[in-house]
Amino acid sequence: MRFIVITKATAESEAGVLPATEDFDTMGRFIQELVDAGVLLDAGGLQSSAKGARIYFDGDKKTVVDGPFTESKELIAGYYLVEMKSIEECVEWFKRCPIQHPGVGAPINIEIRRVFHAEDFGEDFTAEQREAVEKRRAKVAGR
Amino acid sequence: MATDTHRAIEAAWRIEAPRLVAGLTRLVRDVGVAEELAQDALVAALEQWPAEGVPRNPGAWLMTTAKRRAIDQIRRTETFKRKVEEVGRELEESIPDVGAMVAEDDGIGDDLLRLVFVACHPVLSAEARTALTLRLLGGLTTDEIARAFLVPEPTVAQRIVRAKKTLANAQVPFEVPRGDELAARLSSVLEVVYLIFNEGYSATAGDDWMRPELCEDALRLGRILARLAPREPEVHGLVALMEIQASRAAARTGPGGEPILLADQNRARWDQLLIRRGLAALERAEALIDGKPGRYVLQAVIAACHARARRFSDTDWERIAWLYEDLAEAMPSPVVELNRAVALSMAFGPETGLALVDQLMAVPAMRNYHLLPSVRGDFLAKLGRHAEARVEFERAASLTRNERERTLLLDRAAACDQPPRP
């Protein structure tokens, strides 16, 4: 299963303040652990929303607005794309994410979302076929 | 639910399990005992963590708990005195420092690599190696392995028990092979990983064309191995091969679950992220090669040729034909020759391919390989020899153990009765 893990913006990240070297290193070590475990597919950090833009859609009307988007409660600051066996595994991994110095800074959250797989769109097996496969599996298991 | 405590504890344990087993194996010198200790630690975690919460360093907690059990067990056995001399003293002395020992990360990477080589030891059958590797390194339960390979769960359980006994009886040392031995032993490891991948990628039996979770498991194992043995080109080659092949997963199956062959796949559905990763792994491999590329690098280069072709008609078949010739040298096999025949046919016409295939018909090992008549049938059909082609497709259909593939082949046989108009 693939998950996107989203880190959220802070006042610093929105101000374009880069993390201290040691924080880079700490985060780097965490990323390396994900790589060593064979679960990281991709990762990236996003520049502040001041350097970004939004397109607002309202019927046929499209309005382009430059950042920053400071009125937004939760802006995205970064992402990890991982492949893991369950959301529980993903949670246990990312509990260790050094996103914040212990006891320092405002409360922060990271969000885990499961990525759709082609199968989820029903383009793979039909429900009937899936059932048939499961029945066969159960039969084999019972023998 | 992400918040379910029991599942969270199991997930935390699964993350730590391979390193846990590896570190314990170094201490107790027996993979079976190490695994039991690791399981005991899980039981303890399930008892204590709901109240105390998952510890900040779950790996350290589990290792400490398991080591304490190891010492208790050793004290209780009749061979205690002997054990004390061999191993016990080391353990006993280390108990006050267990926290420090566990905090060190040095050596655990090596232990994990040692465990890989033990689990894939050639003294074990391929099935035993596969089951043991998935269990100890892949973190799969016996039940999950059984379901993945469509075998009854007790069969897998027995396989694992016997495998551990065999390793103990053969006194397989807990070490990374060196020198001349390394190449052969590494080859054995890569073979296991690729076997798992192929089981998921193109199921040989049953009605499933693919079992994607197995491909993911194999890929994960391969990537871990690439980090443990980063200077081995064949390891990166295997990872590259698997990443690129896995990139096609969404395109290989139709809406009814039917297989779609390479020529007909919608390449827009190929996962470009995996292709990128595969090409990067291939680059790493090629930078490390000293001498001739091995079988996995060569197969990865072939896969990369396909990955780079935006359409089937853009495929560089001549290059692929040359690569198969190199591959035949690295791993002589009629199957490789068959693939070369297909490439030659695509590059130079079906007569060229047919000539090679007719030679292969005489090879005893090919007699029951369904792809041979399937390929021969394809060449004959392209040459307009439809009656002969039909016979070949029917023969191929009778030889395959995969239902979906049989259907595909019977369809091709039937199509020979209605050949395309010139």
Image (cartoon, rainbow, N blue to C red):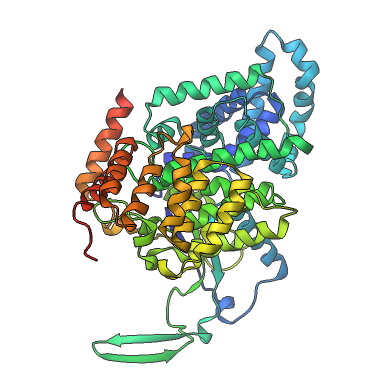
In the depicted view, which residue is nearer to us: B231 or B89?
Answer: B231
* Coordinates of residue B319 in the picture (x, y in percent): 56, 63
Quarter of the image that includes the C terminus of chain A: top left
Q: Is B136 located above or below residue A45 in the figure?
A: above
Taking the image as drawn, is residue A84 in sight? no
Q: Residue at the location (38% across, 48% down)?
A: B376
Taking the image as drawn, is residue A139 in sight? yes
Q: Is B214 located above or below residue B269 in the figure?
A: above
In the depicted view, which residue is nearer to us: B302 or A105?
Answer: B302
Q: Residue at the location (66% across, 12% down)?
A: B76
* Coordinates of residue B239 in the picture (x, y in percent): 57, 52
* Coordinates of residue A129 in the picture (x, y in percent): 23, 45
In the depicted view, which residue is nearer to us: A5 or B142?
Answer: B142
Q: Is B398 located above or below residue A17 in the figure?
A: above
* Coordinates of residue B101 in the picture (x, y in percent): 74, 38
Q: Residue at the location (69% across, 43% down)?
A: B109
Residue B177: image quadrant is top right
Q: Residue at the location (50% across, 82% down)?
A: A49
Q: Is residue B51 left or right of residue B391?
A: right
Number of residue marks: 0
Q: Is residue B237 left or right of residue B196?
A: right
